[in-house]
Image (cartoon, rainbow, N blue to C red):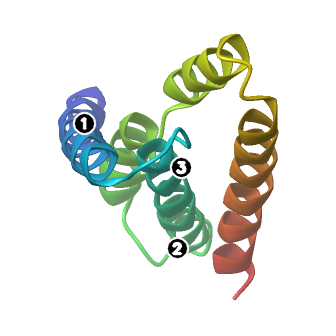
Amino acid sequence: MIWIIGVGGSFGALLRYLIGAFINKKSKGTFPLGTWIINLTGSLLLGLLAKLHITNQIQDWVWFMFGIGFCGAFTTFSTFSNETVKLLLEKQFKIAFIYVISSVFISVAAAAIVFFI
């Protein structure tokens, strides 16, 4: 099963890079919109997949490939952390605060909402 996680992770990492680069190229300002959108959508998808897996509505290989592999590589805490530190070093304290609070609360809420619906 580990190779299934690797395949999903490969696609998740590739898509994260492509979407993040596209959004960041189009967005103006210092707010890291690409990572924010990626983490939000990844949290939504992972919440849905977790619900489907726990209720036995998807097979294990689907969970391994898309839940663990794809979503694990698509969402990114390391980039989120790096972007937050960068904002702090640039003395963009308000933007850093908004980024951290909205990323954490909205992503968790999105996963919970999809999970409980």
Circles 2 and 3: CB atoms closer than 8 Å: no
Three-letter amino acid code at disc 1? Tyr
Identified by mark 2, the residue type is Leu
User: Residue 106's quadrant in the figure?
Assistant: bottom right
Amino acid type at circle 3 is Trp
- Front position in the image: 45 or 32: 32
The residue beneath circle 1 is 17
The nearer-to-camera label among 1 and 2 is 1
Which residue is disc 3 drawn over? Answer: 36
What is the crowding at mark 1: few (fewer than 14 residues within 10 Å), some, or many (at least 20)?
some
Of residues 93 and 107, the one nearer the viewer is 93
Above or below, 91 relative to 16: above
The residue located at (74%, 19%) in the rendering is 91
Q: Is mark 1 on a helix, strand or loop?
A: helix
Q: Which of 47 and 15 is in front in this view?
A: 15
Q: Residue at x 72, y 40 (%)?
A: 95
Q: Tag 2: Cα neighbours inside 10 Å, few (<14), some, or many (≥20)? A: some
Mark 1–mark 2 Cα distance, whole angstroms, equals 27 Å
Residue at the spot of label 2 = 52
CA–CA distance between discs 2 and 3? 25 Å
